[in-house]
Amino acid sequence: METKRDFKTITPQIKKEILSLGYGTIKLNKDIDDLWIDDYENYLSVSIHVNSISIDFDIITFYEDGNSILTFDHVYSIDRQIQIYETIYDHRDQLSYYQLDWSNYFKALRVEDEEGKTVWRILTSEEARHLWYNGRWCDMCQLYDDGTEGMIEDEDRLNECVNNGYDIGIPIS
């Protein structure tokens, strides 16, 4: 028997691909980049002619004439979500990847184990979220008091660490 496919899982995949392109604001030329989100394609039942798109953390916001109108999470038309991805992909040169600021002081932790010494940069919750959503992927780990670490492999684990104030680190040596 053929099992029914769940196409609702496509939306998070599209959003993840968009977030992986970086963060910032994309300015669209209304004459060239014709991106409409119609009232029947979103949960707020508004029709907008998008002239800029902002990406920060895991929020993708659409603007019309400088006013924030919708987020990607409000758009339920998969065809429109794909068009949004393609528009952002075409203008990805206006985005940048989040990078850690190494010029300011940061907390570090040195751990010594049987494999040698490891130095971890402790991330703030904002740095961790930015790197997760809008940075080039790097190994992030939850650091435990006994000197061990556990890989953060999904968004739920990241949110658990951030919400509970657990140390999150990236290896620097």
Image (tube, helix red, strand yellow):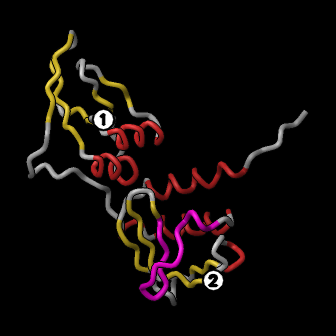
For residue 24, side relative to residue 33 (left or right): left
Q: Rate crowding at label 1 as few (under 14), some (14 to 19) or many (20 or more) other CA atoms within 10 Å.
A: some
From the image, give the main secondary structure of the stretch colored magenta.
strand
Look at mark 2 in the image and give the residue it sits on.
47
* x 19%, y 32%: residue: 120
In this view, 20 is above or below 23 = above
Question: Percent x, y for residue 13?
Answer: 57, 50
Q: Quadrant of the C terminus?
A: top left
In this view, 4 is above or below 148 = below
Front-lying residue, 162 or 3:
162
User: Is 70 colored magenta in this rendering?
Assistant: yes
Mark 2: which amino acid? Ser
| Label 1 SS | loop
Q: Quadrant of the N terminus?
A: top right
Q: Nearer the viewer, mark 2 or mark 1?
A: 1
Which of the 4 image quadrants contains residue 95?
Answer: bottom left
For residue 128, side relative to residue 155 (left or right): left
Look at mark 1 in the image and give the residue it sits on.
166
In this view, 18 is above or below 119 = below
The numbered mark, 2 or 1, whose residue comes first in the sequence reads 2
- The magenta stretch is 60-75
